[in-house]
Image (tube, rainbow, N blue to C red):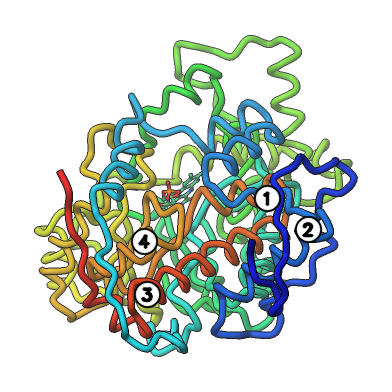
Amino acid sequence: MVLVNGMAAQVTTQRLRQSEVFRPTDMEHESQQPSPEYGRRRQQSIFVRGLGHMVSRVPIDFSALEERARRVMTKRGFAYAAGAAGSERTMDANREAFDRWRIVPRMLCDVSRRDLSLTLFGERLPTPLILAPIGVLEMAHAQADLAAARAAAAERVPFVFSNQASVPMEKCAAAMGNGIRWFQLYWSTDNQLVISFLRRAEACGCRALVVTLDTPLLGWRPRDLDLGFLPFLRGMGIAQYTSDPVFCEGLAQLRIEPTTDPVKPRNNLFHFGARWQQIRRYPGSLLSNLVSRAPLAAVPKFLNIYSRASLTWKDLAWLREQTHLPILLKGILSAEDARLAVEHGVAGIIVSNHGGRQVDGAIAAIDALPGVVKVANGRLPVLFDSGIRSGSDMFKALALGASAICLGRPYVYGLAIAGEHGVREVIQNVLADFDLTMALAGCATLADVASAALERVV
Ligand code: FNR
């Protein structure tokens, strides 16, 4: 039995007929009227709809969410999103490490009203949740970044535009109204392109710059390798480049150099299909793309310049001179790097191991968090991602000293299943869970969460 609007309602576990399954498009999203009651309102709306045998097709449990996404995504798309580096042990370790931390709830703390808000880089945010930068979202859903941007804005959650987005940042920004957005940069070998990205990010209202440091090269990812699939080679996930005046300058005149690679692609129908995809995905009309060299020149040019493996700490001074935006370094896992980050005057750190996609065998991100927080010592905010699947994971990371949390794969799966509404549901579910966990653990504010007790079990 549960109580809904004061009435007792029978909740049965009988199978729901497909026609009765609740479609997100039918949804009247409760957070359209902002309320601090994230938990109770969400629970109530789910249970009330359940009375009419309407359930969402976006599962709440992460394993079910991932499984449903697997069923709707292409094999390659799912492998790209769900896969990680090497044996994938670091991705698993991210989860196992969360499981070793246990919350110690406190009683009689007056949790009748919870305040989940915080100030980050001078901006008041209603909750400590942010959507992480995720590239190539077109493999999850045709509306890709646009759907995620709209969902984030509607739920009042900041969205970090990926450097490898499928939709140019200007289009996403236009769809977000006043919604808070940041831009994530992969530092190219071409400084003029970096400057162009920064100017564009500033012009479209991004409030912070996230520089991802853990991807000077792509990790060794067996799922993608087994399928021989890299989305960028098909012109996917390079929209920030193909919409950029500096990148596109001279592209149509560029000679497509014969590859020096001893392995040449077979000139068969599949290869032709891949080239066709590059042409089709390039901005502009199909006709102009068929006669221009630009669409086929874009991919090799991108591959040549996308990342600068020679970067050192000294280069940060140059970047700081190029923008007034607060700079966050993403991918910090060691206390020593945290010390260097503070020394080099960055505005924030994101503790992350890229969801286990880069270094197989790397430390679990949540295990790296306390050491980084200790070094930061309140001088700059430390954000966290890698392994967040629920509100209680959020609680644990905040209790270990994170200022805010970036959500990754769960929203990609919500997007795959139900587009913008799917992302909104995932956000609502995670926030509802977090709000309830706060209340049940005896916390009314994020300051209470920060001082909440966690116990580590072995
Ligand atoms: C990512 N991530 C990522 N990070 C980044 O800085 N730029 C990017 O373009 C991408 N792209 C990307 C694609 C996909 C499919 C995934 C799963 C991840 C990493 C992302 O920002 C974040 O660090 C991880 O998603 C966190 O791990 P979990 O919690 O999603 O497992």
- Looking at the image, residue 348 sits to the left or right of residue 421; the answer is left
Amino acid residing under circle 3: Gln
Q: Which residue is mark 1?
A: 58
Q: Give neighbour class at mark 3: few <14, some 14-19, many 20+ (Cα, 10 Å).
A: few
Labels 2 and 3: the sequence-earlier one:
2
Figure check: 17 above or below 270: below
- Looking at the image, residue 89 sits to the left or right of residue 118; the answer is left
Q: Are marks 4 and 1 in contact (CB under 8 Å)?
A: no
Labels 4 and 1: the sequence-earlier one:
1
**Which numbered circle lies on residue 168?**
none
Quadrant position of residue 122? bottom left
Check disc 4 and report its element: helix, strand or loop. Answer: strand
Q: Which residue is mark 3?
A: 322
State how far apart marks 4 and 2 are (Cα).
Answer: 34 Å
- Looking at the image, residue 107 sits to the left or right of residue 23; the answer is left
State how far apart marks 4 and 3 are (Cα).
Answer: 13 Å
Q: Which residue is mark 2?
A: 24
Image x and y of residue 368, in percent: 19, 54
Q: Are marks 1 and 2 in contact (CB under 8 Å)?
A: yes
Q: Which residue is mark 4?
A: 211
Q: Residue at position x 24%, y 65% from top?
A: 104
State how far apart marks 1 and 2 are (Cα).
Answer: 8 Å
Q: Are marks 4 and 3 in contact (CB under 8 Å)?
A: no
